[in-house]
Image (spheres, rainbow, N blue to C red):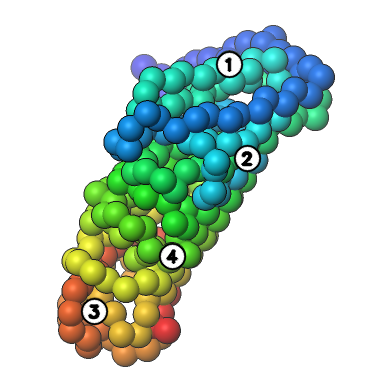
């Protein structure tokens, strides 16, 4: 097929798609506030918490009186939240943020602010579109954690150790910025991070009580990885990136950076093609 014809068809399809979006209006309404006060389940079994928001401001903190306490404030008609509850599952969902159904008009409000229980094990799943996030998981009993986002700014904290072992921590994000503090305090066995272009700070503060594996895949990014000076760390550069700067004492063999400590090991497989990486001991 003629190359100019192919380009013309692509332009026509994209123009039609843009016009169709303009005809779909997500109407803003008077600001609504929904109060959440979910009680604890009638047992102490692991409970699944699922949060799916369309995009906005999202805050999670420890210290709910029940299972989940807090508020949702929104002013887009299609963003009215839905709630699903069984004894050990609780879900709060809005329109799927990755299925574009329209463009909101006017000033948009979508703010979620929740406290979560520290009284029982939690399997937490968070999905969000373009968002600004502050997640403080300090002191929560987390067995699994999965966070999936579009373009976002995210601050995640584990200021004290998770009292149970987290099997998996998954973090997926688009072109974003994210700061994650106290990762070893999360007490996970395995972490998987997939990120688009952006700026990322990973602070592995805490004390290892078992071997830990981390896999990081990122686009064109600036990546800062900070680890305690006493921790045994192995960083395998599995991507094409060559601009890796180190602070502290590291031994370089082929494409592997190793600290000169003994004990349990933090192993990081780093796969980046372009960008900057700073490995810091402190």
Spatial distance from mark 1 to mark 2, Cα to Cα?
A: 25 Å
Whether residues under marks 3 and 4 lie with C-beta atoms below 8 angstroms apart, the answer is no
Question: Which element carries disc 1, helix, strand or loop?
Answer: loop
Spatial distance from mark 3 to mark 4, Cα to Cα?
A: 20 Å
User: Which residue position holds label 2?
Assistant: 113
Question: Which mark sits nearer the N-terminus, 3 or 4?
Answer: 4
Spatial distance from mark 1 to mark 3, Cα to Cα?
A: 48 Å
**In this figure, what is the number of numbered marks?**
4
Of badges 2 and 3, nearer the viewer stands: 2
Residue 118 spot, x, y in % from top left: 44, 48
Question: Which mark sits nearer the N-terminus, 2 or 4?
Answer: 2
Residue 25 spot, x, y in % from top left: 71, 13
User: Which residue position holds label 3?
Assistant: 232
Of badges 1 and 3, nearer the viewer stands: 3
Regarding residue 276, the answer to whether it shows in the image is no
User: Which residue position holds label 4?
Assistant: 160
Question: Which element carries disc 2, helix, strand or loop?
Answer: strand
Q: Quadrant of the N terminus?
A: top left
At a point 38% along the width and 20% down the height, the residue shown is 86
Whether residues under marks 1 and 4 lie with C-beta atoms below 8 angstroms apart, the answer is no
Spatial distance from mark 1 to mark 4, Cα to Cα?
A: 40 Å
Regarding residue 261, the answer to whether it shows in the image is yes
User: Which residue position holds label 1?
Assistant: 101
Question: Which mark sits nearer the N-terminus, 1 or 4?
Answer: 1
Label 1: how many Cα within 10 Å (few below 14, some 14–19, many 20+)? some
Is the residue 41 above or below the residue 143 in the image? Answer: above
Is the residue 277 above or below the residue 2 in the image? Answer: below
Whether residues under marks 1 and 2 lie with C-beta atoms below 8 angstroms apart, the answer is no
Residue 155 spot, x, y in % from top left: 55, 55
């Amino acid at each position: 097929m003629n190359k100019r014809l192919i380009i013309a068809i692509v332009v026509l399809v994209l123009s039609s798609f843009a016009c169709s979006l303009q005809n779909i209006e997500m109407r803003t309404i008077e600001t609504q506030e929904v109060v959440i006060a979910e009680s604890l389940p009638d047992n102490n079994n692991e409970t699944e918490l699922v949060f799916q928001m369309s995009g906005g401001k999202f805050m999670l903190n420890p210290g709910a009186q029940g299972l989940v306490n807090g508020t949702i404030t929104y002013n887009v008609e299609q963003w009215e939240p839905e709630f699903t509850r069984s004894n050990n599952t609780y879900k709060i969902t809005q329109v799927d943020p990755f299925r574009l159904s329209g463009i909101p008009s006017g000033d948009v409000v979508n703010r979620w602010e929740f406290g979560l229980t520290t009284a029982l094990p939690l399997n937490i799943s968070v999905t969000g579109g373009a968002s600004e996030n502050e997640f403080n998981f300090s002191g929560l009993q987390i067995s699994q954690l999965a966070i999936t986002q579009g373009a976002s700014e995210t601050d995640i904290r584990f200021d004290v150790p998770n009292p149970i072992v987290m099997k998996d921590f998954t973090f997926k994000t688009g072109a974003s910025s994210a700061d994650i503090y106290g990762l070893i305090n999360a007490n996970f066995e395995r972490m998987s991070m997939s990120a688009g272009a952006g700026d990322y700070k990973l602070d592995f503060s805490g004390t290892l009580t078992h071997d830990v594996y981390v896999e990081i895949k990122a686009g064109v990014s600036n990546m800062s990885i900070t680890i305690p000076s006493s921790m045994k760390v192995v960083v395998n550069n599995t991507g094409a990136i060559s601009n890796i700067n180190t602070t502290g004492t590291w031994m370089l063999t082929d494409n592997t950076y190793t600290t000169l400590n003994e004990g349990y090991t933090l192993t990081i497989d780093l796969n980046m093609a372009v960008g900057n990486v700073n490995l810091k001991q402190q």
